[in-house]
Each structure stands twice: as structure tokens, then as C-alpha cells.
Image (tube, helix red, strand yellow):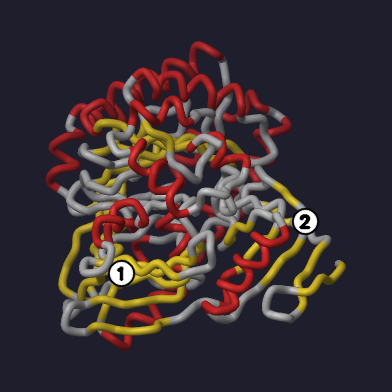
């Protein structure tokens, strides 16, 4: 791997190929820089502009789209991590933008705080998670970006833009889900809540019964999600109920967690995906076995240990946000599509929910939202399946997750997001030279 002079006078690295976690994107940046301070980020941005190179921040690479691909200067912001300030009175924490979500429980625990909601994967960086609209589930809870109360970003001319409820407040709904198009996030302030527990109730239930009662189930639960393995009639539901952090925990015994969440959900699933790839006709049989292996269980633990699970089987994913009320209809359409086409799909379909919000590019903007995510094992072809499902989603006013595969472009989004034109205008103001652009952003926002 070669070296080049970095913006802070140190070594910038060239020659390494960077890949997304799902192996959907790969790039060899002209230069890689790893700033350890906000000032180093500012210098890197200015230097990139002078050199005529685009510059992009990268976190954990957990997006499947090319949203973080940097052909010019790749800015690894891992060095900008940790707790920078805690406002105990308002339960707010300011973090370096490169902090990973999995690090937050140990950082917040000494202050008696936790994130209000989390997704089911915690490998992402804070900046990457909010910038792409990462969300969890729960009809009364918004995505992670809805917890943002302030941010600091480096704009195209290298200056700092501070956004909060008292400073440039009108920009907060745009910056919270900024797609990395408005600047380099260096600090993020999140609204937290006191530490709490979740009681998890996991059940295998008849899919049609779940769909028939879905509005009531969603409204009556703090956090409801379910998985459905194609070629089966079973929904694997997970209902999480919030309880005070002072209540007694009844965590899964270590052996049970190891067997269920590591051996079955990862190691055995990896084996079955590999078998299904070489012998697709056996996939329906494998899926029926999988639904039987996923047993009923109840446990109570600290919220991060219930929200997030470890995933080691690589996959590719497309997820669409829909009006919550159409989820049952759309899921039935996907089921019919799979059977008509004779596809053999080994990965489950995931269904989650989120509260409406007012963030300009949030997939839940202005409506109670249901999410349907389809996946394929990363070694299997996915395009035909995803594109056919996407047609169904588009017919129901679906909005694609910014970090997951889709084929939509700026023309589509003008009609899907009421504030899309305003966001594009703000981008023009903050980054007229398109220093933070790449091929993906050119497609979804316009060149």
C-alpha cells in the first residue's frame, strides 16, 4: 500500500481496496486519511478541494448502496469517537461522529443513559447511522435520526456549521438525515433516556393471523417486529416491552444465547445458505426446518442487549418504507410474486414499524411507517428478485432506505418527499462544488 502526504502533514494511504460489508461496492481511493481531530478534518476538506478531489467520510461500511464510496479522498472518521459532553439535566450526550453504536452502552451506562431506540444491528458509526436513516421498530418511536438534537459538520469551504435547537435550528431537520451530502459530520448530540430494560417475547405464529391483527398488534406493543421465511406460513414475532431499569433482569443464560444466537442464527444459517445456493430446490425444506428451530422464548435484559443481535452471515438487502396500513397487502403480494416466479429464497423477509417524523429525508417523513426488507445471501444473485419486489413497493408509495439497494433517482424522490427540493437547495448552498458528492449521490440528488 502506497503513501501520500495527508492534509495534516501526516501520511495519507493509497492503494487499498475498500469494500462494503455486504460486498456490494468496492473502490480504491486516491488517498485515505484518518483524522484524529476536527481541525484535521477541516484541513483535509480544504486540501481535497484544492486538489480537485471529492472527499467522503466512511464509517463501518454497513450500507449496501454506494453512499459512502470515495474515489478521491476517503476520510476514515474512526478517530473522532467517544463521549465529548454529557448534559445530565436534559439526558443528552454529544459524541464524536465516528463512534460506533456497539460502543455506546458502555459509554452511556456510567451516566445512567441509553438510546431511546436502536436497530437490530449495532456495527454502524453514529454518523453513518443517522445519515442513512437507520431505524429500529416501534410505532411510537422514530428512527435514530429523530434523536438528534445537534450536530457539527465541516462544510465545503472547510468552515464549521453548528446546528442545534438554538443555532441554525431551521437546518436540523435536514442535517439529521443528510446522506453525507451537506458536509462531514464531526459531532452529534443525541437525546437519550434513562437506562431501561426490555422484556422480549419471541413466538412462532401463523403468518395470516399476524397480518390480520397487525394494526392492533403494532399499536399495542412498544416494539414489534417479525420475520417471515418464504415458502412457509409462519411469522417469527418479537415483541419488546419497556420496563424500568431498576426492575429485575431475567437474561438468557449464556449457553442458551450461544446456542440460539450464535450456533443456530449464524453458524447453522450460514451452512443452510451455502447448501441452498448449490441446491435451490431444497430451500423450502430448509426454511420449514428453520421456523421449527426458532423456538418460543422470553427474557428481560438491558435494552441494547435485546435490540441488537450479532450477524455474521453476509447478505445483501433492500428495504422500503411504506404507509403502515398497507404492510399486510404488500407482504401478501411479495409472497405471491415469489411463488409465481418459482424462486427459492432462503433469507427471511423482515417487517418493522416507526413513528412519523418531520425530518426532510427521513423515510418516515409525515406518515406512520412500516418497513419491509428483503435479503439474499451475498453469494446468490439478487437483482431480479429485488427489482420485482421494488415494483410492488413503488406501486404503494414506497420510499427506499438510503443505505440499502434500490434503483430510484432524484426524479422519483421529488414526488416522494415534500421537502426534497428544499434539501437539494440546501446542498447547493453548502456544497456548490459537489466536494462531498459521488456517483450514488449524483443519482439520488442530481448532479
- Decide which of 174, 92 is in the foreground and name it: 174
Q: Would residue 331 appear left or right of 103 to someone viewing this image?
A: left
Instruction: Report which residue position mark 2 lands on.
Output: 17
User: In terms of secondary structure, where does tag 1 sit?
Assistant: strand
Where, by quadrant of the figure, is residue 91 drawn?
Answer: bottom left
- Position of residue 350 measured from the top left corner of the image (x, y, whole percent): 40, 40
- Position of residue 343 measured from the top left corner of the image (x, y, whole percent): 57, 20
Examine the rendered structure and indicate whether residue 89 appears above or below residue 104.
below
- Decide which of 259, 62 is in the foreground and name it: 62
Where, by quadrant of the figure, is residue 252 drawn?
Answer: bottom left
| Mark with earlier residue (1, 2) | 2
- Position of residue 42 measured from the top left corner of the image (x, y, whole percent): 56, 72
Farthest top residue? Answer: 340
Is any atom of residue 224 visible in this view? yes
Q: Would residue 344 appear left or right of 393 to someone viewing this image?
A: right
Query: Residue placed at 73% from the left, 32% from the top?
Result: 278
Measure the alpha-carbon separation of dots 1 and 2. Answer: 33 Å
Q: Quadrant of the N terminus?
A: bottom right
Query: Residue placed at 20% from the left, 59% from the top?
Result: 241
- Position of residue 325 measured from the top left corner of the image (x, y, whole percent): 21, 29
Examine the rendered structure and indicate whether residue 411 appears above or below residue 300.
above
Query: Residue placed at 41% from the left, 61% from the top?
Result: 308
Amino acid at each position: 500500500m502506497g503513501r501520500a502526504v495527508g492534509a495534516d502533514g501526516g501520511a495519507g494511504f493509497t492503494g487499498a481496496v475498500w469494500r462494503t460489508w455486504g460486498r456490494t461496492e468496492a473502490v480504491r481511493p486516491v488517498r485515505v486519511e484518518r483524522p484524529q481531530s476536527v481541525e484535521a478534518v477541516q484541513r483535509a476538506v480544504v486540501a481535497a478541494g484544492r486538489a480537485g478531489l471529492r472527499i467522503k467520510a466512511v464509517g463501518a461500511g454497513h450500507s449496501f448502496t454506494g453512499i459512502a464510496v470515495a474515489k478521491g479522498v476517503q476520510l476514515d472518521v474512526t478517530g473522532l469517537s467517544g463521549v465529548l459532553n454529557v448534559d445530565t439535566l436534559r439526558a443528552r450526550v454529544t459524541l464524536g461522529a465516528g463512534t460506533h453504536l456497539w460502543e455506546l452502552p458502555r459509554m452511556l451506562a456510567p451516566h445512567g443513559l441509553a438510546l431511546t431506540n436502536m436497530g437490530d444491528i449495532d456495527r454502524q458509526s453514529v454518523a453513518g447511522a443517522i445519515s442513512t436513516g437507520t431505524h429500529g421498530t416501534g410505532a411510537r418511536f422514530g428512527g435514530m435520526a429523530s434523536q438528534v438534537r445537534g450536530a457539527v459538520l465541516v462544510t465545503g469551504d472547510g468552515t464549521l456549521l453548528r446546528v442545534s435547537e438554538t443555532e441554525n435550528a431551521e437546518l436540523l431537520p435536514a442535517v439529521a438525515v443528510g446522506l453525507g451530502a451537506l458536509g462531514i459530520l464531526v459531532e452529534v448530540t443525541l437525546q437519550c433516556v434513562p437506562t431501561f430494560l426490555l422484556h422480549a417475547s419471541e413466538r412462532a405464529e401463523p403468518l395470516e393471523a399476524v397480518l390480520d391483527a397487525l394494526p392492533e398488534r403494532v399499536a399495542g406493543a412498544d416494539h414489534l417486529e417479525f420475520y417471515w421465511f418464504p415458502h412457509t406460513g409462519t411469522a417469527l414475532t418479537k415483541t419488546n416491552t419497556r420496563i424500568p431499569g431498576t426492575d429485575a433482569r431475567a437474561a438468557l443464560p449464556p449457553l442458551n444465547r450461544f446456542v440460539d444466537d450464535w450456533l443456530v442464527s449464524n453458524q447453522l444459517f450460514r451452512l443452510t445458505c451455502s447448501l441452498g445456493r448449490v441446491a435451490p430446490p431444497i430451500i423450502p425444506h430448509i426454511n420449514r426446518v428453520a421456523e421449527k428451530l426458532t423456538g418460543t422464548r422470553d427474557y428481560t435484559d438491558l435494552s441494547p442487549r435485546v435490540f441488537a443481535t450479532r450477524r455474521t452471515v453476509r447478505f445483501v438487502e433492500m428495504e422500503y418504507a411504506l404507509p403502515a396500513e398497507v404492510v399486510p397487502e404488500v407482504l401478501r403480494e411479495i409472497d405471491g410474486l415469489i411463488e409465481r416466479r418459482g424462486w427459492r429464497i432462503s433469507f427471511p423477509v423482515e417487517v418493522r414499524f416507526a413513528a412519523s417524523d418531520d425530518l426532510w429525508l427521513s423515510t418516515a417523513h409525515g406518515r406512520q411507517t412500516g418497513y419491509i426488507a428483503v435479503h439474499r445471501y451475498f453469494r446468490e444473485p439478487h437483482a431480479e428478485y429485488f427489482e420485482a419486489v421494488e415494483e410492488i413497493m413503488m406501486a404503494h408509495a414506497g420510499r427506499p432506505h438510503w443505505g440499502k439497494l434500490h434503483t430510484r433517482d432524484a426524479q422519483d424522490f421529488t414526488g416522494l418527499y415534500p421537502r426534497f427540493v428544499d434539501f437539494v437547495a440546501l446542498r447547493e448552498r453548502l456544497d456548490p462544488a459537489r466536494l462531498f458528492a459521488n456517483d450514488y449521490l449524483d443519482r439520488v440528488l442530481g448532479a
